[in-house]
């Protein structure tokens, strides 16, 4: 993306709220699943809910690596959860973690962590989610 912008004489900002004001900001929502989440019957109840409970316990650890100035974006308005509170819900775009309708309907699938900002390191975020949802629960 940087090369394309350079070729067209424009720049990109990774800032989660590059222009202050009454608008959403820019996030890097992270869709996440494991093979067990996708394939195990009723994994929403038996696998994902314990994962989400652990994500709630470690909420501020996640926020610490979810991007600089993320507090400007995670205000509780504009389809975001407040930065200091963890929540999840089916089809809830204002939650920290959104459970897609299909996941709830089928009892298995994936979830979307909506907290990461646009300026994250995706390897740190993915690693933190994996540690919290798999390694810490093993």
Image: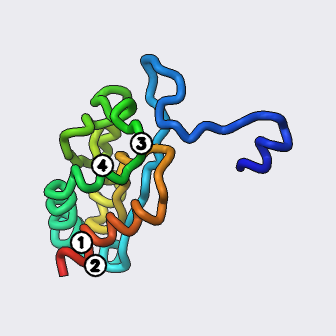
Identify the residue at image location x=43%, y=55%.
30
Mark 1, residue position: 43
Residue at disc 4, secondary structure? helix
Please say if 101 is above or below 24.
Answer: below
User: Is tag 1's residue or tag 4's residue first in the polypeptide sequence?
Assistant: 1
Q: Residues within 10 Å of mark 2 (few under 14, many from 20)?
A: some
Query: Alpha carbon of mark 1 to alpha carbon of mark 4: how far?
Result: 26 Å
Residue drawn at the location 47% of the way across and 51% of the way down = 120
**Cα–Cα span, label 3 and label 4:** 9 Å
Mark identifier at residue 63: 4
Q: Are marks 2 and 3 in contact (CB under 8 Å)?
A: no
The crowd level at tag 3 (other Cα within 10 Å; few <14, some 14-19, many 20+) is some
Tell us which disc is closer to us: 2 or 3: 3
Residue at the disc numbered 3: 68
Residue 69, by quadrant, is top left
Q: Reply above or below: 19 against 108.
A: above
Q: Earlier in the sequence, mark 3 or mark 4?
A: 4
Helix, strand, or loop for circle 1? helix
Q: In this view, does 103 lie above or below 28?
A: below
Cα–Cα span, label 1 and label 3: 33 Å
Mark 2–mark 3 distance (CA, rounded to whole Å)? 36 Å
Q: Tell me which label, 2 or 3, sits earlier in the chain.
A: 2
């Amino acid at each position: 993306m940087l090369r394309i912008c350079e070729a067209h004489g424009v720049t990109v900002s990774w800032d989660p709220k590059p222009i202050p004001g009454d608008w959403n900001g820019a996030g890097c929502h992270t869709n996440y699943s494991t093979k067990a989440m996708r394939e195990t019957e009723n994994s929403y109840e038996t696998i994902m809910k314990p994962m989400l409970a652990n994500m709630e316990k470690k909420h501020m650890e996640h926020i610490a690596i979810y991007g600089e100035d993320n507090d400007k974006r995670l205000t509780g308005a504009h389809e975001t959860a407040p930065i200091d509170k963890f929540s999840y819900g089916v089809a809830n775009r204002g939650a920290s973690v959104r459970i897609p309708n299909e996941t709830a309907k089928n009892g298995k699938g994936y979830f979307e962590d909506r907290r990461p900002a646009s300026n994250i390191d995706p390897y740190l975020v993915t690693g933190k989610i994996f540690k919290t949802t798999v390694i810490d629960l093993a």
